[in-house]
Image: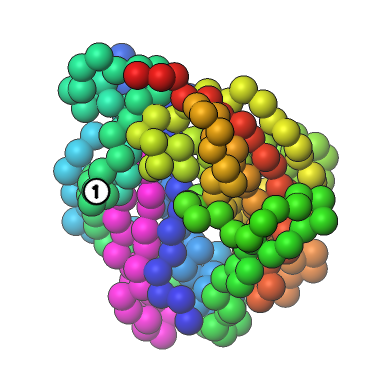
Amino acid sequence: MRKVSYLSYNMTTADANDPDGIVPVGRQFDFIGDVETEEMILVDGDESLCLGYEDVKVHHDVYIGDMMEYKATLTHIGNTSRDCRIEVFKLATPAQRAGKENCRPGDMVWFDEPLLCTEGNVRLVVKKHLQRGEQPDGAVREPWRHLDDFPAEGKPKDTITYRYRMSDRDVFYGGGVVNGARSITLMEDAAKRMMAKAFENTGRCVEVEKVRLYAPCFAGDYMEYIAGIRKIEGNKVFIEVRSYKIIEVPENPPYPSSIDVLEDPPLSTVVRFVYEIEEK
């Protein structure tokens, strides 16, 4: 059983409510809640109920433009209670905010060691009759397998993984379906994170070469986006992003809070972006 869960997010202006661009702690708990819930799904196949948090310490503020990672680590399993350690890390921040001078648009500082911003403990409960047993780990075994729609030679050398849970905020169509444009936005977030890590600059998207939608996603689905650099030509960077569905709400769940981890996560969407970096 996988005892550690991760989720990702790049903070935007919609997340901040402070004149200085600070993201409220409450917004952090939106993602903390999702990542701790994933760990419960892995343990019991159920979304669980959160009983409360203890000793939550905020070490560093989070700002617009920060690239964040949320981590939940299972620490205890009781009869119905489950405990997790929660941690929030900042992977990168805008260079200007970090105090760098003569910054280009899109310049970022990618930390050699992720910066721990928030940590604490959470207790959750899954009632006995809702416990469905240990679930698959939801690992994508061959993310860069050959696709006829996207011919390429081998696997990208540089890759990153970005994980997110779809919610009602992401839904556009009836039936809880997330529109393709929202998926592309999240895949662009993954591509920008790839750019920040490889070049310490998010670059500028100048072309979307191709988009292929294979399977729809819905509110409640946990998605994994894997971005890789296919090639570099001058100041242009060609990035391919593939999304996989890791966890989904079953069509006929045994209980309203039941949710399934997929043993063989299906491919959902593939996008090829072209980014351009301004020369120094």
**Occupied quadrant, residue 122:** bottom left
Q: Does residue 203 sit above or below 169 in this rendering?
A: above
Span highlighted in magenta in the image: 64-88
Q: Does residue 75 sit above or below 244 in this rendering?
A: below
Q: Secondary structure at mark 1?
A: strand
Where residue 208 appears, x then y in whole percent?
Answer: 69, 30
Where residue 144 appears, x then y in whole percent?
Answer: 64, 61
Count all numbered tags in the image, as a single digit. 1
**Occupied quadrant, residue 222:** bottom right
In the rendered image, residue 71 lying in the magenta stretch gets the answer yes
Q: Residue at x 43, y 79 (%)?
A: 80
In the rendered image, residue 149 lying in the magenta stretch gets the answer no
Q: Residue at x 35, y 34 (%)?
A: 200
Q: How is the structure coloured here?
A: rainbow
Left or right of 163? Residue 96 is: left
Q: Does residue 124 sit above or below 112 in this rendering?
A: below
Nearer to me, 69 or 144: 144
Where residue 273 appears, x then y in whole percent?
Answer: 64, 35
Where residue 31 appears, x then y in whole percent?
Answer: 44, 47
Q: Main secondary structure of the magenta part?
A: strand
Nearer to me, 98 or 121: 98
Q: Which residue is mark 1?
A: 112
Let me know if residue 50 appears in the view: no
Nearer to me, 106 or 115: 106
Q: Amino acid at mark 1?
A: Asp
Q: Residues within 10 Å of mark 1 (few under 14, many from 20)?
A: few
The quadrant of the picture occupied by the C terminus is top left
Q: Residue at x 80, y 64 (%)?
A: 251
Left or right of 93? Residue 262 is: right
